[in-house]
Image: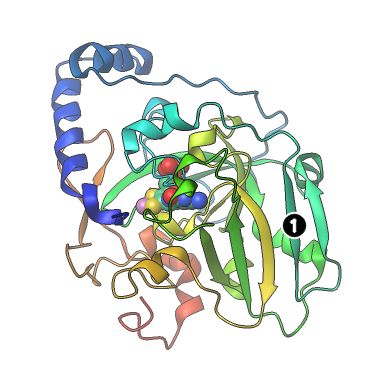
Amino acid sequence: MGELDREVTPPEVYFNRRSFLRAGIVAATTAGTALAYRRLNGVELQSVERPPIPNLTRPAAPGFIAQGEALTPKDSIVNYNNFYEFTTNKDGVAAAAAGFDTTGWRVEVGGLCAKPRVLDLDDLRRVSPPEERIYRMRCVEAWSMVIPWVGYSLGKLLALVEPLGSAKYVAFQTLFDPSRMPNQKTDAVLDWPYVEGLRLDEAMHPLAILATGLYGQELPPQDGAPVRLVVPWKYGFKGIKSIVKITLVDKEPPTTWNKSAPDEYGFYANVNPNHDHPRWSQATEQRIGESGRRKTLMFNGYGDQVASLYAGMDLDVHF
Ligand SMILES: Nc1nc2c(c(=O)[nH]1)N[C@H]1C(S)=C(S)[C@@H](COP(=O)(O)O)O[C@H]1N2
Ligand SMILES: [Mo]
């Protein structure tokens, strides 16, 4: 129960079927394609409009905007999700999370730092201007997307609380509220709350962001409203959603999928086409909306920026 791979084959079949259908829908607009999906596949697509995020900036830095990549249509990003607190059915997250209320959200940032803080969403927005980051997203299940996130480098928030010299890692925690996240009523799915972690130097890398939006609008619930982590060189499960707590710690913190299956999901979870999952190859991936498979890139194509973080480490040991 609750294994990330349970739908490794089905999504391929699913999206090959969709690609096949799409091939017959020449020059369809995204909206038109969505309508065609609904008609031909009986898939109930949620169309999502959220408040726009004003004053987006686009600072230039290597890797901030994926070059030569077509954006994954918004309809796909908001209708094909992993968010096990709501449902393990990727097609069902959008509907299951639709009423998720984030009013009064607070994020507690503390642990080994000089200036611990509790931030509400306005405080979080004030930390740094919203930036558009267009990143590849590679799920450990071997599907991928290209997503225009809105957010800013996590390092800007961490700098604000002034990490102590003893801080070596950062631990993250998702909301625990079974009345709002129905699968948290049972521990048969995963251990709750969902937790994740990064080494402090990974967390300070400018590519690692706190995202509060996508496609220029506030995050919809299914993608981790109101704030989630995005670490584009790592498998998608590192990108913990609906964060309520960020803690600076001195030891490697436990992470949900590693606790669940340590041989399959490591702490580092860097995208690595040469390190197969015990039960499937990681050499290729299914880009959502494309037919056929493409080669998976080391560090998901961000090696020039991040490989030095892992100099001298055996990536088969620290997978
Ligand atoms: N709290 C929480 N965060 C989570 C997950 C989850 O089930 N719960 N799923 C992870 C996985 S496996 C992936 S691939 C991404 C999916 O993000 P998306 O649905 O926005 O594409 O979220 C990650 N973050
Ligand atoms: Mo994933």
Q: 8 or 96, which lies in front?
A: 96
Q: In this image, 57 relative to 213: left or right? A: right
Apparent side of residue 24 relative to residue 192 in the rendered image (left or right): left
- Residue 295 seen in the figure: no
User: Along the line of sight, which residue is nearer the eye, 234 or 194?
Assistant: 194
Residue 282's place in the image compared with 249, above or below, is above
Where the C terminus falls, by quadrant?
bottom left
At numbered mark 1, what does the secondary structure look like: helix, strand or loop? strand
Q: In percent of the image, x 25 and y 18: which residue is there?
A: 37
Q: Quadrant of the N terminus?
A: bottom left
| Residue drawn at the location 35% of the way across and 64% of the way down | 271
Residue 244 picture location, percent across and down: 66, 52
**Residue 17 vertical placement versus 133 (above, below):** above
Among the 4 quarters of the image, the one containing residue 302:
bottom left
Furthest residue toward bottom? 312
Residue 188 in view here: yes
Reply above or below: 253 against 93: below
Q: Quadrant of residue 133?
A: top right
Q: Amino acid at mark 1?
A: Glu
Q: Which residue is mark 1?
A: 108
Where does the image place residue 85, in percent across and percent down from the top left?
A: 46, 45
Where, by quadrant of the figure, is residue 301 drawn? Answer: bottom left
